[in-house]
Image: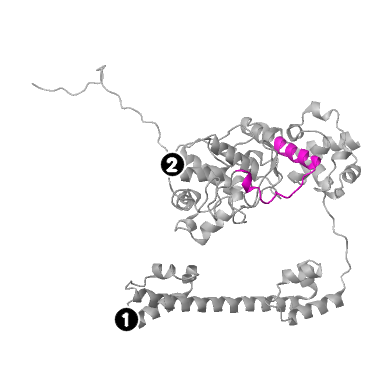
Amino acid sequence: MTIKPYCNDELWKPDKYQLPERSRLNHLPPIGIETPVVESLTSYITRLAESHSISISVLMTRELAPLLNKYYIQNGITKGLSTLLNRGGALNSMGELAQQLVDSLEKLTLKRNLSALTLLPLSDFLSSRELLHKTKAWCPYCYEEWKVSNKPIYEPLLWTLKDVEFCSRHYQPLQTLCSYCDRQIPWLSSKSRIGYCSHCDRWLGSSINCKNTANTVFSEEDLSRNIWISLTLGELIALSNKSSTLTQKVNLREAVQKIVDITHQGNIAAFARAFKLPKNTVWMWYKGKSIPNLKYILDICYCLDISLLSFVTLEETAFQSLKINPQKLSNKFRIKRASPRNFDSRDIELSLQVFLNSQQTPPPTMKDVAEKLGFDRRTISDHYPELCKAISSRYFYYQRLIRAKKIEDCCKQVREAVIFLVKRGEYPSEARVSDLISQPGYFRYKKVRMALRDAKSNLNFQA
């Protein structure tokens, strides 16, 4: 009996099954897509790391760093990684770093449209100046509600915006300090957990955690304004995720021109006086030479009773009956112009001499001196470069002395730690010594490493 090979015309010949593409990381779906409370990218990264039961550091160094071409953070928790994590707020913004991270995560998870978790869809509309909270802001009532109802806990992109100070769902101010350790929480750190403090690891939900605003009294007007800001910004974020053509409709220059023309017949100076803004600033907006900060756009829209979305999309019906509501004009967002001061050269020179000869510990920096004198540091340096250089040099010399003393103290601790470990019958390795000294990071200094080697050599241990 002979077995014939497959023929091309055989109907039962099995075809090769095409397996779908597999993702490197968990195909984790983002929360709240196309809604005002869409998840932020830092929140998504935190949940992605948690779904794999790994830390943020491992996720960043082993998975994201190669795709980001950030090879300086691939060796663990280094200075490079710390720098990247300290810029966690920028990951939710609209810069190059946010775009690179979105592209990398889309490759690893095979999820699409992760740019909706950032402000990238609004990059043509928003100015990056004073746009984001530097540290985490959250609503403890939202955390508690999601936990009780067994819903996923996350951080909405809306909470990252600096102008959002209230939760529009619970009519409560967002918190910025942990009520247990009284510290600010970074948006992303190696110990980040959604709903928990990355410093003390305590739960941030419920009304117990309303410490930083517990004694603050908000007027009805402030509450109304802040809730309006949360709602109108949420509306804009939701539409930017739904409509890819929104950014094509955005023309801030045309919107500003239309408002000035309708409310003040094109009189830029009169418009600037009405909102207590510098005329040159409004002129730059009017000519399209600069983009207004978000807080000024919100201020104008609120006083004109027009939504931010109508302002952005140039909605005709909203622009038909524009009128400034004087009761809504707020001092909070007015630009303060510094009153001119006379630069008394003789007085400034004498003051600099006093700061230079003072016995204050630590000695003042030029930044401190400029603040106390009430003048810009560059202005003072232009007039008295030698005195300013001497003040800075004195401060840097003091810093070197302090650092040298700390290194010497660390060397002493290393020698004591070696003796302690030997008495316990343990080998004095660098890892074990690091656990016993107050500044293990000081092993980056050659003098500290030499102290460890000499201490082991004196006790007949080979380095």
Does 400 sit above or below residue 111? below
Looking at the rendering, the stretch of residues picked out in magenta corresponds to 206-232
Q: What residue type is labelled 1?
A: Asn
Percent x, y of residue 132: 67, 48
Q: Which residue lies at the image location 53% right of the left edge and 35% below the top edge? A: 151
Percent x, y of residue 204: 58, 47
Number of marks: 2
Residue with the most extreme front position:
208
Marks 2 and 1, the one that precedes in the sequence: 2
Q: Which amino acid does label 2 sit on?
A: Leu
Viewer-closest of 283 and 425: 425
Mark 1 neighbour density, 10 Å: few (under 14) some (14–19) many (20 or more): few
Percent x, y of residue 55: 46, 50
210 in the magenta segment: yes
Q: Is mark 1 on a helix, strand or loop?
A: loop
On residue 460, the disc is 1
Does 104 sit above or below residue 31? below
Visible residue check, residue 39 = no
Whole-angstrom CA distance, mark 2 to mark 1, is 49 Å
On residue 25, the disc is 2
Q: Which residue lies at the image location 43% right of the left edge and 69% below the top edge? A: 434
Q: Considering the image in quadrants, where does the C terminus appear?
A: bottom left
Residue with the most extreme left position:
1
Q: Name the front one of labels 2 and 1.
A: 1
Q: Is mark 2 on a helix, strand or loop?
A: loop
Q: Is residue 425 left or right of residue 448?
A: left
Q: Considering the image in quadrants, where does the N terminus appear?
A: top left
On residue 148, the disc is none
